[in-house]
Structure formats: C-alpha cells, structure tokens
Amino acid sequence: MLLAPQLRQAKANGLSSLKIQDRTDNGRNAVNPCRPPIFNHDPLAWAHAIQHVSGLIVMALALIPLIWLDQTRVQIVGFALYPVEHALNAVLFPGVITPLRGNGTALLILLPTLALLAVVFAVLRSLYCFARAAVHRLIGAAR
C-alpha cells in the first residue's frame, strides 16, 4: 500500500495510483525492484526438485545395463556396428581405422547412427517423391 503523502505526491505529478508500484515488502522493508527476491516462494518447488532427481535416477538406471553389457566378454552389438561404421568411415573419413567397440559403447554409437540413416533415407525418399510428382506434372501438362 502506498502511504497517503506518497499517493498525493504521485497524483500531483500526474500519475494515477495504478501506475505507482509499491517498493516495500509485507514487512514494509524497502525492496529493490531490479533484484529478484532471495527466496523463491514457489509452492511446487519440491515437485520440481523431485523431477530433477527422478530424471537422474532414470538416467542412472538406463546406464547400468549399458555398463553391464559393455563389460561382457561376448561382443554382439560391436559386430553389428562394425560394418556400418566401417562403411561410413570409408566414405566420409578414408584414412580412419575403425575399431571394434564394446557392446555398450557400440549401442550408444549405433542408435544415433541409425537415426541419422533414417533421416537421410526420409530426405532421399521425399526428394524422390517430389521429383516423381514434378515429372508426372510435366508429362501431364504436355499431353
């Protein structure tokens, strides 16, 4: 709330009471409007904290099987990744030696590689469909 002298002074300066901001908190202490409050009075702060902690727990639980898979002696995923990685390295980076990776590491590399190949395939398919539609339109216009 504004005090009566402050309100009178504001009205004398031509400002309405709605445009005047109170620069005090509930205890009538001066507040700097450019500075955020010390405590964020967010009623859902505990829920946001639980979300962050639960995300870390899910990530840790997802990495535990990958670490176990990486430490097994039988290489399954590494042999599946090797031809794909070797072909990509031969095309993009000709002088690179392609290593045989562990299962967990190969899985972490294989998933983005497959996603990249899916994106490239979708782009090529879209270009093919566009070219085919353009050719059919030109042929139809010529008739």
Image (spheres, rainbow, N blue to C red):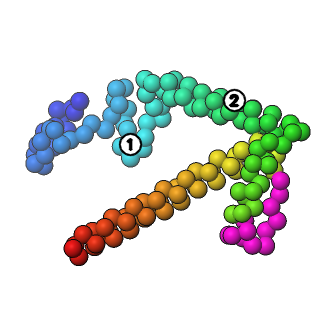
Q: Residue furthest right?
A: 73
Q: Name the quarter where the N terminus is drawn.
A: top left
Give the residue type at disc 1: Asn
SS at circle 2: helix
Q: Is residue 98 magenta?
A: yes
Q: Nearer the viewer, residue 126 or 101?
A: 126
Tag 2: Cα neighbours inside 10 Å, few (<14), some, or many (≥20)?
A: few
Question: Which residue bears the numbered disc 1?
Answer: 32
Above/below status of 1 relative to 123: above
Q: Which residues are magenta?
A: 89-100
- Where does the image place residue 92, in percent across and percent down from the top left? 68, 70
Q: Nearer the viewer, residue 95 or 13?
A: 95
Mark 1 or mark 2, which is nearer to you? 2
- Where does the image place residue 45, in percent across and percent down from the top left? 48, 27
Tag 1: Cα neighbours inside 10 Å, few (<14), some, or many (≥20)?
A: few
- Where does the image place residue 139, in percent across and percent down from the top left? 28, 72
Q: Is 19 situated left or right of 54 in this image?
A: left
Question: Which residue bears the numbered disc 2?
Answer: 61
Q: Is 81 situated left or right of 2 in this image?
A: right
Nearer the N terminus, badge 1 or badge 2?
Answer: 1
Q: Is 143 situated left or right of 103 in this image?
A: left
Write the residue at 84% across / 43% down: 75
Q: Nearer the viewer, residue 31 or 36?
A: 36
Write the residue at 25% across / 40% down: 21
* Snapshot quadrant of residue 44: top left
Q: Name the chief secondary structure element in magenta.
A: loop
Q: Is 35 situated left or right of 107 in this image?
A: left
Write the residue at 36% across / 43% down: 33
Above/below status of 126 relative to 16: below
Write the residue at 72% across / 63% down: 87
